[in-house]
Image (cartoon, rainbow, N blue to C red):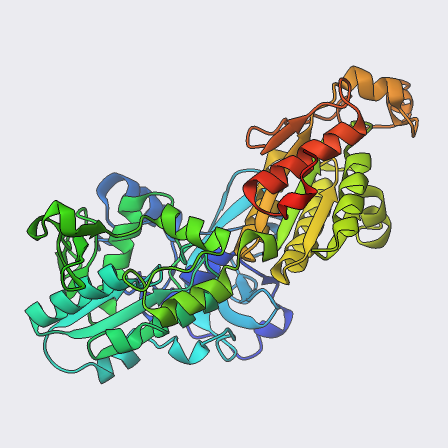
Amino acid sequence: MSNGWVLPDDVLRDAPVFTPRPGELADLELLLSGAYAPLTGFMTRADLTSLSRRGRLADGTSWPVPVTLQVPAAVAEGLRLDDPAGRVLVLTDGEGAPLAALDVRDVWSGRDGSAGLGGPVQRIGDGGHAPFQRLRRTPEEVRAVLPPGRVLGVIADRPLHRPQLAQIAHAARTLGAHLLLMIPVGEGATGGLPPEALVRAVFAARDRMPPATLITVPLARRRDEISDALLRARVSAAYGVTHLLSTEETLSGAGLRVLVPRELAYDNRDGQWRWRDDIPPRNRRLAFRQDEIDDHLDRGFPLPEWHTPPAVAKELARARPPLRHRGLVVFLTGLSGSGKSTIASGLADALREAGDRTITLLDGDVVRRELSAGLTFSRADRDLNVRRIGWVAAEIARHRGVAICCPIAPYAQARSTAREMAEAAGAGFVLVHVATPLEVCEQRDRKGLYARARAGLLTGMTGIDDPYEEPTDADLVVDTSDISIEEAVQRVLHLLTEVGWIEPRLNPA
């Protein structure tokens, strides 16, 4: 897939602008850096069809996964493919800084009012900004500084504890290889930590490693493990890796060998990590599972030194404080009149009385007046309203406050986006479904909205002529038709206490 494309200097002035999603931005950076060679841009339909049938691009080049760009249909409609100047789309980062120009060679209809675009990309601007940007080096730059001989690649998508460090040291020593440690900082690639926290945690273990080159790579997670593993192998080879240490046995090709480490255990006789089967059971301590590590951090228990270097443990404790000190989004959803706003207010009052946390209540009506004025009740605007609420709530939680939200939020995808925003900010997300039946909500009808909708004076009323998609992932379900508001508040408080988000003294029992 070659471009042979030179961008005229005057084309950018009137070109439309679009900000891709985080995963697409990660792909864009790898395209621009050469890590996705021979790809030079987002795939066209011909490439995608050939890939699905033969595992190769349209020109016959082997490639493991689709690399695509989706845009709103309105953006695609403004492009003119028969005009070299009219088919340029400027791609920006989340802050609007231009990153690249896309020469659109192919457009096709996608799902939910979207369109797919394919064509080569060319870098513009200074490449964007991010924490630890100095570590984002191109494959060409990295290969130029690697010593000759074997290169052991490790993709550190989680902090390195003592068992992983022992595996790395053994592999490097056995191969006589230089270590290239690649820290993925793309969407969903950082083991539940913000990217900058993962980088700090990996660097904290540097004195426990053999001599190494450390870089960050904007790798985003793919939908399935096999595709993810194949792409990681491909990118690793582009950076000069000859041997890749990975638990994925499905990896093959890409011009490198894959080493699958054996399971290690801690030998309490001398404090060393060895192959598990070489240690008598009475002297063997197994490495913590990820859920055990998470549980220690959630409860505020220190990770033991036999398992985690103190410097790494310190970084993890900074990045993931105990739940009672971590940011939280409590998201209540339900029909108009279900009682969610009253429950949210009662919850906010109870938490403020305790005084342990900073509380922000984002009520639906207040948000529409202060944050989302001018939006209609169309599906797109409702989704935008929930997205704005989710973004503000995530920022509150990023700074370790508690955000309580209570929009109707009738659509599952918008609620899922709010959850993703909170988790990306390193915060928790608790979804409460206030499942009061429609007939009870209509009987209450404090604002007269249902009556107007039934009379045909109001359209787009959730539950009447617009659907409410009931959550299947709610952490708590309450129904105010058979319990009081006070009891509903106490149930939410009980859940938050039981999980560990608030101090036990708030427990109504």
Q: Residue at x 88, y 22 (%)?
A: 444
Q: Quadrant of residue 214?
A: bottom left
* Observer able to see residue 472: yes
Q: Nearer the viewer, residue 6 or 272?
A: 272
Q: Nearer the viewer, residue 95 or 284?
A: 284
Q: Nearer the viewer, residue 355 or 384?
A: 355
Position of residue 118 relative to residue 239, above or below, is above
Q: Residue at x 53, y 38 (%)?
A: 111
Position of residue 267 relative to residue 342, above or below, is below
Horizontal arrangement in the rendering, residue 272 relative to residue 397 (left or right):
left
Position of residue 398 relative to residue 361, above or below, is below
Q: Nearer the viewer, residue 213 or 269?
A: 269
| Residue 410 place in picture, x, y as percent | 69, 32
Position of residue 503 relative to residue 26, above or below, is above
Split into 4 quadrants, where in the image is the C terminus? Answer: top right
| Residue 208 place in picture, x, y as percent | 25, 74
Horizontal arrangement in the rendering, residue 69 relative to residue 372 (left or right):
left
| Residue 141 place in picture, x, y as percent | 29, 81
* Observer able to see residue 64: no
Split into 4 quadrants, where in the image is the N terminus? Answer: bottom left
Horizontal arrangement in the rendering, residue 330 relative to residue 277 (left or right):
right
| Residue 499 place in picture, x, y as percent | 55, 41
Q: Residue at x 30, y 45 (%)?
A: 225
Horizontal arrangement in the rendering, residue 205 relative to residue 341 (left or right):
left
